[in-house]
Image (cartoon, rainbow, N blue to C red):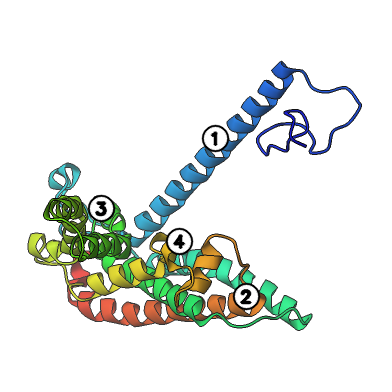
C-alpha cells in the first residue's frame, strides 16, 4: 500500500481499504474536508462561548453574595444613596446555586462510578489525581465563597487569569536551570537568561495578584484566603503544568491521563468526586460562618 490511492491518510475522506466501486471526485473530498473544518470550528466556538458564559454566571453570583458598600464605579457614584434590598433567602439561594454548580456534576459522576464499581468494574486508585483534584476544588471554593464576594466583576476576571501560576513557575525554573547548566558557553548562557526573563516577570506579576488588592482596597479582608485559593487552584489545574517531560517520573500517571494514554478508572473517579464534594461543602460552610461574623456589624447598609 505505497501508492497514493491506497495509502491510509486520516485527513482524507475515503475508506481505508481500496474498493472497486465508484470513488469520490476531488471536489466532493474538498467539500467534505471543508464541512469537517466548519463543524470543528463551530463546535469549538460554541464550547468556548458556553465556558465564558458559565464562568461569568458564577462570577456574577459570587460578587453578589455580600452587599456592595464601597463601589467605585460611575453608576454607583451617581446612585450612592440607593438602598440595596437583600434578604437572607436571596443570599441562601446564591450559596445553594454556587454549590450546585460545583457539586452537581461530581454527584452525577459519583453515582455513575459507584454503579460501575457495583458491577465489578474497579481499578487501582490513583492517589495523585485525588490529591490534585481536591486542591482544585478547595481553591475554587475559597475563591468563590470568600474572595470573589469582596471584589467586583472586573477584578474577579483579572484574578481568574492568574490560575496558570504553577505552569509559569515551572517554565521559569526550567529556563533558569538550562542557563545555569555546565558545559555551555557564556554567550549561550546569557541568551538563555534573556529568554527566562519574560517567564520570571510573568510569574512575579501573577504572584503580585495575591496581595495587590489589599493595597488598593482597605476593606478587603481575604488577605490570607486569596493566595491560598490561587495557589491551590493553580496546583489543582494539573493539566496546565503536566507535559511530556513528566513521562517516566513520579507524575507518569498524570502524564498518561492527560495525553489519553491511560483512562481514569471508576475507583479513582468515585473517590475524586467524593473528595471534590466534601471539600466544596466544607469550605462553603466554613466561609459562610466567617463572612457572617465579619459583616453582621454592617447589616445596616443593606
Mark 2: secondary structure: helix
Q: Residues within 10 Å of mark 2 (few under 14, many from 20)?
A: many
- Residue at (22%, 74%) from the top-left corner? 295
Circle 4 or circle 3, nearest the eye = 4
Going from N to C along the chain, the mark reached first, 4 or 1, is 1
Q: Earlier in the sequence, mark 2 or mark 1?
A: 1
Using residue 150 as the reference point, say whether residue 45 is left or right of it: right
Identify residue for label 3: 158
Residue identifier under label 2: 110
Residue 94 coordinates in the image, percent (x, y): 41, 64
Q: Position of residue 217 (x, y in %)?
A: 11, 62
Question: What residue is disc 4 on?
Answer: 244
Vertical side of 121 occupied by 256: above or below? above
Foreground mark, 2 or 1? 1
Which residue appears at 83% of the width and 23% of the height?
23
The CA distance from mark 4 to mark 3 is 29 Å
Q: Residue furthest right?
A: 20
Q: Closer to us: mark 4 or mark 2?
A: 4
Q: Which mark is residue 41?
A: 1
State if disc 2 and disc 4 touch (CB < 8 Å): no
Question: Does the rendering let one see residue 15?
Answer: yes
State the image quarter where residue 143 is shown: bottom left
Amino acid at each position: 500500500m505505497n501508492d497514493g490511492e491506497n495509502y491510509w491518510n486520516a485527513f482524507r475522506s475515503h475508506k481505508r481499504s481500496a474498493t472497486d466501486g465508484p470513488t469520490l471526485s476531488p471536489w466532493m473530498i474538498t467539500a467534505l474536508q471543508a464541512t469537517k473544518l466548519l463543524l470543528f470550528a463551530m463546535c469549538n466556538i460554541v464550547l468556548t462561548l458556553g465556558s465564558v458564559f458559565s464562568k461569568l454566571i458564577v462570577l456574577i453570583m459570587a460578587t453578589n453574595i455580600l452587599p456592595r458598600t464601597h463601589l467605585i464605579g460611575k453608576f454607583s457614584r451617581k446612585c450612592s444613596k440607593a438602598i440595596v434590598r437583600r434578604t437572607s433567602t436571596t443570599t441562601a439561594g446564591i450559596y445553594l446555586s454556587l454549590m450546585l454548580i460545583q457539586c452537581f456534576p461530581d454527584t452525577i459522576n459519583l453515582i455513575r462510578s459507584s454503579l460501575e464499581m457495583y458491577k465489578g468494574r474497579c481499578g487501582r486508585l490513583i492517589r495523585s489525581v485525588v490529591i490534585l483534584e481536591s486542591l482544585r476544588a478547595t481553591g475554587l471554593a475559597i475563591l468563590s465563597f470568600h474572595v470573589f464576594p469582596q471584589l467586583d466583576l472586573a477584578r474577579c476576571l483579572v484574578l481568574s487569569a492568574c490560575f496558570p501560576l504553577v505552569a509559569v513557575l515551572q517554565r521559569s525554573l526550567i529556563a533558569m536551570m538550562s542557563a545555569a547548566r555546565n558545559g555551555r558557553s557564556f554567550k549561550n548562557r546569557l541568551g538563555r537568561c534573556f529568554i527566562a526573563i519574560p517567564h520570571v516577570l510573568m510569574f512575579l506579576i501573577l504572584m503580585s495578584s495575591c496581595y495587590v488588592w489589599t493595597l488598593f482596597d482597605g476593606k478587603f479582608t481575604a488577605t490570607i484566603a486569596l493566595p491560598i485559593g490561587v495557589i491551590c487552584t493553580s496546583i489543582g489545574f494539573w493539566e496546565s503544568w503536566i507535559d511530556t517531560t513528566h513521562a517516566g517520573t513520579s507524575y507518569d500517571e498524570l502524564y498518561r491521563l492527560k495525553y489519553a494514554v491511560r483512562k481514569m478508572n471508576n475507583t479513582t473517579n468515585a473517590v475524586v468526586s467524593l473528595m471534590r464534594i466534601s471539600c466544596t461543602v466544607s469550605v462553603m460552610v466554613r466561609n459562610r460562618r466567617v463572612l457572617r461574623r465579619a459583616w453582621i456589624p454592617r447589616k445596616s447598609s443593606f
